[in-house]
Image (cartoon, coloured by chain):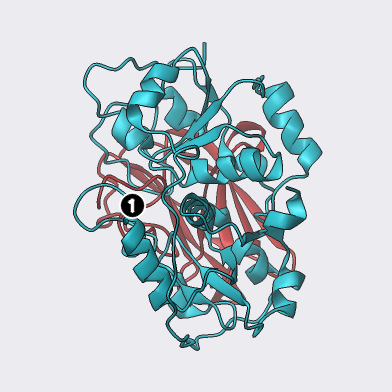
Amino acid sequence: MSRSDVLVDADWVEARIGDPGVVIVEVDEDTSAYDKGHIPTAIKIDWKKDLQDPVRRDFVDRAGFEALLSGRGISNDDTVVLYGGNNNWFAAYAYWYFTLYGHHNVRLLDGGRKRWELDSRELSTDVPSRQATSYAAADQDATLRALRDEVVAAIGKRNLVDVRSPDEFTGRLLAPAHLPQEQAQRAGHIPTARNVPWSKAANEDGTFRSDDELRTLYADEAGLDFARDTIAYCRIGERSAHTWFVLHELLDQPNVKNYDGSWTEYGSLVGVPIELGEAR
Amino acid sequence: MSADGCGAPAGGAPAGGAPAGGAAAGDQAVVEGRVVRAGAPVTTGYARLLGTGEEFVAEVPLGEDGGFRFFAAPGAWTLRVIAPGGVRAERAVSADYGRVTKVDVTV
């Protein structure tokens, strides 16, 4: 798989607005951003309401994902182009999610909403209506998702990549700095994890750095051994989905999992080891 | 706010940053302000908080009033604003617990 198979630029998207086989989907941290203006013909998926089980902490199940995509008028043959704000955090999360349920014809708009806005490209408030489909999803691909027991067992054995900011990694903050610091769970990081903030993989305009720069970042600067399996985590898994996208999709590394339970789960588990301060 | 957002509360952080819960900082180290151009708010653009060596800390899209808000760790930071048309502006800011640091930026 190459970069062009998974990542498209704004010109590519602009040229395909209205293409019946291409569905543009906005997935944002700020779920109201779409309503203020979006890429023409784009539909919206709400990461919270649409992609999370309303009761327990988990994804919607396979049937729920099928119902969601069918209702939004997405068919199995469509090319899905995902984009969003905040440097594509939630769009990358949705990309991982679509891949998890077997929709492989999916691309990420490089730079997401930010690059589109900084380019002063057209935004629309028209909400398109798409005819319902009968979408068929696959079972979740367990090779892409890490659960807590696997993470605990991976300490000291696999690459653990903590993609949060250095202040969250060392335990000075419990949440990113654009959010109130009101979390109650323990601070710190999983022992043996390397701290490679997701932001190091992105340019200021939200686009991804070049493959060579990314390889240097993870292999040379962070000392990640690509021969070992890797688990990425953050706080609930969308910043680490951004890093999963880099490692698994752009750098074509197999055996990379995203731990979506991430720090909100790990930092609340009883009896697991936690480290504070810099990486050891 | 729920505790389950990697970078977001339930429903996501709105443009301009999450609410501070009133004018007081409480136990937070708040950095907030507005971006204006010719007296009018800049509503399309981004505020970034950077640490030493330009280390990225956080970013929010500007709000309808050109506003932004961060909940930082105590210390010295750089605030950078970027907007369409190659607009860039920077300010040095400091943050401390229990204090709201106001930074207004004219571009």
Front in this rendered view, residue B103 or A137: A137
Name the residue located 57 percent from the left edge and 51 percent from the top edge. B48
The amino acid marked with disc number 1 is Phe
Q: Position of residue A99 (x, y in %)?
A: 53, 52
Q: Chain of mark 1?
A: A
- Output the letter for the chain in red: B
Mark 1 lies on a secondary structure that is loop
Query: Does any portion of residue A228 appear in the rendered image?
Result: yes
Q: Name the tint of chain A in the rendering.
A: cyan
Residue denoted by label 1 = A59
Q: Position of residue A259 (x, y in %)?
A: 43, 36
Does residue A220 appear left or right of residue A36 in this picture? right
Does residue A191 appear left or right of residue A220 in this picture? left
Query: Does any portion of residue B42 appear in the rendered image?
Result: no
Name the residue located 44 percent from the left edge and 39 percent from the top edge. A142
Front in this rendered view, residue A231 or B22: A231
Residue A4 appears in which quarter of the rendering? bottom right
Front in this rendered view, residue A265 or A97: A97
